[in-house]
Image (cartoon, grey):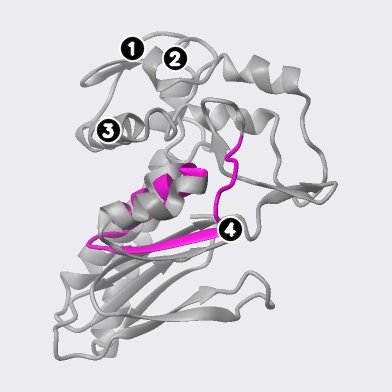
């Protein structure tokens, strides 16, 4: 998950230990299956198929269907083929902005509309890649929380690097207190505290991944239509929804909307916290 992960439980210690083991095993399973950095998994097989069709298992096909829906809903702004842009963009806090020609060259290999998806077969043109990083951590948090909740009715919270799911709480039980990290204060300080009893919470933002040149800040979220960082995006968007996957989808889509982020969030009728 490339981040600290936690399982908090109000169950008895032995049950809580089992919840932790189940959640950890599921996190490692999804990491092994969908990490773009590992050889031999389904992502590697898709990305190295050189134009040949790859038959996907049920779980992966469902993720592809979901991301294809996001592509349509976002008018192409959410695109799992845009990961190749990392070849020219490295958001390390420096001032290294790539040349326009380099971005344009890589952009030729971006575009879900160029893929051939006829479930369960997926074909990409040589040089294209898929990357499930935009939904993977939230999906893993939901899966891990469901497994943890299967062991006890006691309240349980799964936190995968700020992608959070509260499970098994009843209306009579205390909420979990969750903080939104401040962008101006020191690391770990909260600018907002949220009471979360049940459901998912996800945040998208540029607090740690950005470039800065001549006073202009370039956030890490890229517009796959242009190959460049989204213009006028909020610094941070947090959304509470029924699931972490849904919350992550809405927070990411809001960031991709740039100046229209608040308008988009208002139309979704979900609790949200937008920081500029």
Position in image of residue 126 (x %, y %): 51, 10
Find the distance from the CA under tag 1 to the CA under tag 3: 21 Å
Contact? badges 2 and 3 (CB < 8 Å) = no
Q: Please tell me the numbered disc located at residue 69.
A: 3
Q: Nearer the viewer, mark 1 or mark 4?
A: 4
Question: Of 174 and 222, which appears nearest the observer?
Answer: 222
Asked whether, in this view, residue 41 is left or right of residue 184, the answer is left
Contact? badges 1 and 2 (CB < 8 Å) = yes
Asked whether, in this view, residue 251 is left or right of residue 207, the answer is left
Residue depicted at 29% across the width and 88% down the height:
13
Q: Residues within 10 Å of mark 1 (few under 14, many from 20)?
A: some
Which sits earlier in the primary sequence, circle 1 or circle 4? 1
Which sits earlier in the primary sequence, circle 4 or circle 2? 2
Q: Which residues are magenta?
A: 229-258
Residue for badge 1 = 53
* Magenta run includes residue 237: yes
Residue for badge 4 = 235
Q: Quadrant of residue 112?
A: top left
């Amino acid at each position: 998950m490339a981040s600290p992960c936690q399982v908090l439980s109000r169950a008895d210690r032995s049950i809580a230990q089992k919840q932790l083991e189940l959640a950890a095993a599921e996190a490692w399973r999804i990491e092994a299956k969908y990490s773009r950095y590992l050889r031999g998994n389904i992502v590697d097989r898709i990305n190295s198929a050189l134009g040949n069709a790859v038959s996907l298992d049920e779980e992966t096909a469902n993720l592809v269907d979901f991301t294809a829906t996001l592509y349509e809903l976002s008018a192409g702004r959410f695109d799992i083929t845009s990961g190749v842009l990392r070849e020219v963009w490295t958001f390390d806090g420096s001032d290294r902005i790539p040349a326009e020609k380099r971005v344009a060259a890589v952009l030729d290999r971006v575009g879900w509309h160029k893929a051939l998806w006829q479930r369960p077969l997926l074909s990409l043109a040589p040089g294209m890649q898929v990357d499930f990083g935009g939904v993977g951590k939230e999906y893993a948090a939901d899966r891990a929380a469901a497994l943890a909740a299967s062991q006890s009715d006691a309240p349980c919270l799964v936190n995968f690097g700020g992608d959070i799911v509260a499970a098994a709480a009843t209306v009579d039980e205390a909420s979990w207190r969750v903080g939104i990290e401040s962008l101006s204060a020191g690391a770990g300080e909260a600018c907002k505290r949220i009471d979360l009893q049940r459901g998912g919470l996800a945040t998208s933002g540029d607090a740690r991944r950005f470039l800065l040149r001549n006073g202009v800040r370039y956030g890490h979220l890229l517009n796959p239509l242009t190959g460049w960082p989204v213009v006028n995006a909020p610094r941070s968007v947090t959304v509470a929804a029924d699931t972490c996957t849904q919350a992550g989808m809405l927070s990411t889509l809001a960031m991709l909307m740039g100046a229209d982020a608040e308008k988009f969030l208002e139309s979704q009728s979900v609790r949200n916290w937008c920081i500029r």
